[in-house]
Amino acid sequence: MSNQVGDGEVAAAFKALGDPVRLRLLLMIAAAQTEQGVCVCQLTPAFAVSQPTISHHLKQLRQAGLIDCERRGTWVYYWVVPGVIERLSGTLADALPEAAPVSATGRG
Amino acid sequence: MSNQVGDGEVAAAFKALGDPVRLRLLLMIAAAQTEQGVCVCQLTPAFAVSQPTISHHLKQLRQAGLIDCERRGTWVYYWVVPGVIERLSGTLADALPEAAPVSATGRG
DNA sequence: CTCTTGTATCGATGGTTGTCGATACAAGAT
DNA sequence: ATCTTGTATCGACAACCATCGATACAAGAG
């Protein structure tokens, strides 16, 4: 019941985290914890890749449902979608030795 | 704080989970919970892809450090490397809002 | 209006990935 | 040795991806 969503959605989220730049982006966005989100202008200079690449990775994270954004004036702010990290943790918990509430084999 | 390992290793693990077949493989292997591991012969027929593809994905998971295997006679058995899921959960926990229940750190 | 700065999109490119069939390797059975 | 079954590797191919420079779009300043 925890995640009735298929493996596809969760796998897509893990896939989005499967790039070092994107993983660090998400952690940086999550670490800010401000309701207003993190300005892209703070993220871009923290990486050794170009600005279009950062923009591309942010789009990937957004399409995976991990983050969302909003433009306020000149700047664009990103934040972590609430609850999505918990859902991924839940899937990982299914792979822990003691937790076996959901059967992965029982898909059909 | 907890993971001294760089984002690269963790990202590689998430990347390995970023394919629906691999994610389901890992969940199936983890669900078995037997010390002997899960026989490949139980995994292969559970998917709509060919046997070489399953073998390839198992190799990917193994190279990401998520699972390990051993041959016993004719069959090969796979199991989840102990502790690796916990480490991924730890990284995800770093992306959770630190709602400290004990004291108000007053970060806002 | 123009100029500047922040961000996204476009187009191209080299590298990676998922998949398959064919085949090699491993091990037990006959 | 030969046959059969289980598993891994090889070679190939199409699709995808991360990255870049160039450029378009957005919004404020002068």
Image: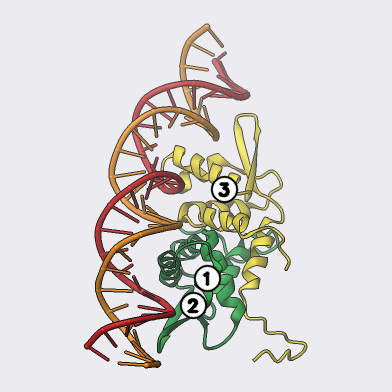
Chain colours: A green, B yellow, C red, D orange
Q: Which residue is mark 3?
A: B61
Q: Residues within 10 Å of mark 1 (few under 14, many from 20)?
A: few
Q: Which residue is mark 1?
A: A45
The chain letter for the residue carrying disc 2 is: A
Q: Which residue is mark 2?
A: A41
- Where does residue C2 sit, x and y in percent of width and height? 26, 84
Q: Residues within 10 Å of mark 2 (few under 14, many from 20)?
A: few
Going by the numbered disc 3, the residue's amino acid type is Leu
Q: Decide if residue B72 is on the left or right side of residue A74.
A: right
A42 or A90, which lies in front? A42
Q: Secondary structure at mark 2?
A: helix
Res. B9 mark: none
Tell me which residue sits at (72%, 60%) in the image.
B4
For marks 1 and 2, give the CA distance. Answer: 7 Å
Q: Tell me where residue D14 sits by quadrant.
A: top left
Residue A86 seen in the figure: no
Tell me which residue sits at (54%, 45%) in the image.
B60
Q: Tell me where residue B69 sits by quadrant.
A: top right
For marks 1 and 3, give the CA distance. Answer: 33 Å
Residue C23's place in the image compared with B97, above or below, is above
Q: Decide if residue B100 is on the left or right side of residue A83.
A: right
